[in-house]
Amino acid sequence: MEENLKDRLFMKKESGWKSVDENEKKNIFELSKKYIDFLNVSKTEREFIKSARKLADENGFKDIMEFESLKPGDKIYFVNRDKSMYLAVIGEDSIEKGLHIIGSHVDSPRLDLKPNPLIEEGGLAYFKTHYYGGIKKYQWTTIPLSIHGVLVKTNGEKINVNIGEDENDPIFTITDLLPHLAQNQMEKKLKDGVEGENLSLLVGSMPYDEKECSEQVKLNILNILNQKYGITEADFNSSELELVPQFKARTLGLDESMIAAYGQDDKVCAFTSLAAMMELGNVKTTAVCILSDKEEIGSMGNTGMESHMFDFFISEMLNKLGVNRPNLLDKVFCFSKMLSSDVDAGYDPLYASVSDKNNAGFIGKGISINKYTGARGKSGASDANAEFVAWVRNILEKNNILYQVAELGKVDIGGGGTIAYILANKGADVIDCGVPVLSMHAPYEVTSKFDVYSAYRTYKAFWNE
Ligand code: MN
Ligand code: MN
């Protein structure tokens, strides 16, 4: 038997760390440090876009609206309602040959305040919430939470709110029942143990010092907010306030190989693609980076990927390149290639039974490619063509980037989706390609520093192709 037959024929699926030298390790840890710092000031979609815009400005990108005309090498962006953003580097080739798009999302599962959030019950003041995206409700009780977002007054004045991140700020939490009295709760199914309507944030307990008045604790809270922001209760009606875990993004593990942070789905792919775009020089094919919003609730609305806002951005690009004509936008999309950069479910040995080990994405084994997503019979999947998968594999292999092709869990267990189908519907070749995550959608998610770096290298190689 040929001695290296197995080496030659088997696919290698070993830890990426095995092939990392000291220099490479330094690069990996440096990028992770930047990522951690970025996450700590970018917990919500609005904060992420604000940080992204700042980074883009620092790296010579300009608002497309500032340009009269565009030429190869120009670096542009468009910010959509402070919650989503598109960036591009104009390529040297004719744009009619299509775009190289990388698309992620910057929204993450969380708790939103209701439009009329403030109540007083039993001498305590609460903000009532409505959860956003797919969460396991029990995970959001008894952890420190901070309040992020905006309040907009009828005169248009916008107040940015961020309470709980500064060490001197108060934090907030949602209470849970003590085990001593939780017999009935503990008998319930896990999904019913904490009701959505009970995810109410504890915000106060001190009555306003005035006699002959009901709801004095609520009054006291409103008075504090009025003094701090000049708002009244009705101003909550025009607010977007989000509760996110107060935990800082941190290095995880004695070997410091991992990252624990809130919102890594999908800020890990958003950050790595953004970081890669910042370093692009001249490119052959126009490189486009999408940082979308509302993916976690179906990509609807004017900041979601289903919106025509992205088409508007590309049309504006075609206009300013001076090449636009009827139906050119359709042609450009039909000849485009896209990496839908969203996270994959990492194989978790503690919950091994949900994964097919031979088709799972492993932490630390590189970027994870999902040929298709969907659930139970590929329902709802955007299934990438074999030809396109081969084209992507070729880029990865010639750049020595470790990758794994995986699917999200066992066939009958479940599944998921991304923004991949939206661009595929426009005619582009699209494949899902992102970082495997443990505890996805939990308040604290886990990734491998090796995979974060692999994602960054993948996105850079794709745009430089
Ligand atoms: Mn995602
Ligand atoms: Mn998600």
Image: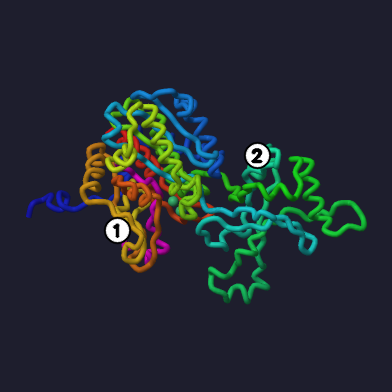
**Residue with the most extreme left position:** 1
**Is 343 part of what is drawn in magenta?**
yes
| Residue highlighted by disc 2 | 160
Q: Is residue 456 visible?
A: yes
| Residue highlighted by disc 1 | 359
Disc 2 packing (10 Å; few <14; some 14–19; many ≥20)? some
Question: The C terminus lies in which quarter of the figure?
Answer: top left
Task: Describe the element under mark 1 as helix, strand or loop.
Answer: helix
Magenta segment boundaries in residue numbering: 337-360
**Residue with the most extreme right position:** 211
- Image coordinates of residue 313 in percent, x first then y, are 42, 36
Disc 1 packing (10 Å; few <14; some 14–19; many ≥20)? some
For residue 341, above or below residue 191: above
**At label 1, which amino acid type do we have?**
Asn
Q: Residue at x 61, y 60 (%)?
A: 141
Describe residue 412's horizontal placement relative to residue 442 as left or right.
Answer: left
